[in-house]
Image: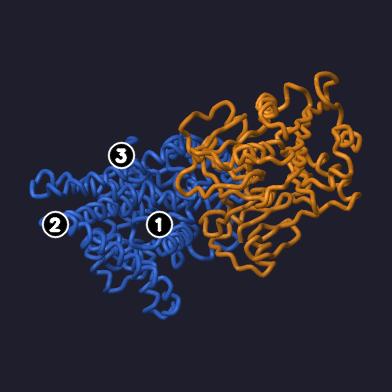
Amino acid sequence: MTLVLRPNANWRGFEAGQYVRLGVEVNGVRRHRCFSLASSAHRKDRSIEISARVNPDGIVSPYLKHRATTGEMYTVSPAQGEFTLPERRPAHLLMIGSGSGVTPLMSILRTLHDEHHSGRVTFLHYARTEADMLYRDELEDMTRHRPHLTVVRAYTAQRTGGDLYGHLSEEHLAAVGVDVVDVAAADAYVSGPPDLVETVRGIWTARGLADRLHTENFAAPVAPTAAPTTHSVPHAKVIFARSGVSAPAAGVSLLELAEASGLRPPFGCRQGICTTCTSRKLGGTVRHLLNGEVSHVEEEQIRLCVSAPYGDVTLDL
Amino acid sequence: MRTPIMPVPRLTSEQLDGLARDLDAVRDAVMADLGTPDAEYIRRLLRLQGRLELAGRALLYLGFLPPVWVAAVVCLAVSSLLNREEIGHNVLHGQYDWMGDPALSSQNVEWEGLASSKDWRRSHNYVHHTFTNVLGKDRDIGYGIMRVSPEQKWHPYYLGNGLYAALLMLLLDWGFALHDLEVDRLLRRERAWSENREIHRRLRRKIGVRVLREYVLFPALTGPFFFSTLAANACAKVLRDLWTSALIFCGHFPAGVVTFTEEELADEGRGHWYYRQLLGTANFDGGRLFQIMTGHLGHQIEHHLFPDMPSRRYPQIAPQVRAVCDKYGLPYNTGPLHRQFFSTWRSILRLSLPSRVVTRRGATSRRLGRLRVRTDTVGRR
């Protein structure tokens, strides 16, 4: 799923490799998701592009894929993230990406392309099969025009048609000519699922090159776990983000928990009527104490007096 | 609990639990169904309100033509009414908090009323909606200036009951703003002046901005028609307040509403809270457009049971609420607006005299039986 957005005058631009928090209204409720930007940071029309794999059990990505129409308006946060190139572009860049994790790498590639960057770029591109490989045609096209760019296609669930097969290993690095010397000379950018990132980190750390490595995790959306039998989850933690205080979740309301932690949030009826204690939940899962309803919505307004933690919770308090 | 004209059934604690379960089920079904139509409804209203205001302001450039001037006043009055009731009152109840839109969040929105949203949320959402009809707790019982229940002790001051009501009708917005200062409690030394400092500050700023805008800036923008515009703006506000107060008085100062004591609040469960809301409110009839123009105040019962449910859903659940009332033998009071209005005023005037008189009359009406109940029971907001 690829989306092109035209930001309004408040947009301050971005650096290749950064992401934004997109707010999309689905069935009346504003949902927030982080998306890496895939477009060049130098687009003339200032438009930005995001790409993501559709999670069929999700809410936002299926909406964007099947129901969103041209002209809809979303909210976009300022660009965030440290997965960016240094001001002085590296002479040799090694990029390793997998799945939709390649989107920030595409942004870096496209940006360098627009800058007529002449350094060496090696892109080790992992995908399950050829059909799953994002930007395959565009990358092929790029390599034809840019002699310094090498794209190595690695398939993990397909045994023909690629340059490499299976998951990343030292052998893969050696096979594409990225030997020890090269690794030391290159700035490495890796973006993909946690497994891939950890493997690479292991190899780089073993070589004492961890400081040359830049990583971006693309975690698969975590499916809500089965309902615990008790009313709260053991070892869950409540973080009061603004006060910098945290407390272990207990079987009491978030209002009582906040008060026990020394906070003084405003309150009124303490029974879910008056909305005085309504606060923003920045993340996590809460359970409504009156009807038992469990909510995973990433960011929402909740009444502290009738909400209890149901797993880790972060509050704007 | 005061026994009203028709004895109200007392429920056992099991029945109260059942009542809570049944009403929670009504609520949960609607809340799970909220979605795009509800979001579109409130946004459509916001757009309509904006256009009406724009139209009203623009028409005042032709304010020297009497029919245009009248049209402008109507536009501005309706715009202001929507802003206060169907939009402001409901949004501040958190009816659209589920959307996650900061522009429709109960915590962010500043409405057109003179009372700041923050103070309104305290006196209305918290005090009135939590302690509904509890004498000594619910400050909306007569707003601290009127006698609307025989349980309030009579004092010669209340001879002016009708006058206070009439003045409040004309200046409702100002009345609500001052309501938050709790002047009556200040005078009785139950409240310290220092508690009002913050409220004062917010009130001064808000009133300053509103007065400048309505009675200086917009009149000045119409140049030679300064006074015609000023008059139109003032008329629009008074019209809005007359209409709004007529609606909420009907819901607020009934003959035959049940009041409660603070003792009854001890260990109150959800079931009894629902019970109290049901006994202390009444609806008035009307179609969809009428309900929008009244901010769905005609569905007081549903509003008091579920203050955070988007108001457009009240007509939809009314039959279910009525069925629950029937199941537990509780009254579900509704009637045409004019009848409720007449009954309210009769009660206000009657209560300006000492209770002895009222009690005698009450005894008479009890003998008259059911017919009086139908014509007399109106509810509180």
| Real-space Cα separation, disc 1 to disc 3, in angstroms | 25 Å
Task: Kindly indicate whether the residue at mark 2 contacts the one at mark 1 (C-beta within 8 angstroms).
Answer: no
The mark found on residue B290 in the picture is 3
**Which chain contains the residue that carries disc 2?**
B
Q: Which residue sits at x=69%, y=53%?
A: A313
Image height of B100 relative to B204, above or below: above
- B93 or A7, nearer to the observer: A7
- B183 or B224, nearer to the observer: B224
- Percent across and percent down for residue A157 are 83, 24
The residue that label 2 is drawn on is: B223
Q: Which residue sits at x=68%, y=53%?
A: A308
- Percent across and percent down for residue A38 are 63, 37
- Residue B153 image-quadrant placement: bottom left
The mark found on residue B110 in the picture is 1
Q: Which residue sits at x=27%, y=52%?
A: B246
Dot 2 and dot 3 within a common chain: yes
- B247 or B275, nearer to the observer: B247
Query: Mark 1: which amino acid?
Result: Glu
Label 3: element kind: helix
- Percent across and percent down for residue B20 are 58, 46
Q: Residue furthest left?
A: B65
Residue B30 visible: no
- A293 or B252, nearer to the observer: A293
Give the chain letter for orange: A
Query: Mark 2: which amino acid?
Result: Gly
**Which chain contains the residue that carries disc 1?**
B
Give the chain letter for blue: B
| Real-space Cα separation, disc 1 to disc 2, in angstroms | 29 Å
The mark found on residue B77 in the picture is none
| Nearer mark to the viewer, of 2 and 3 | 2
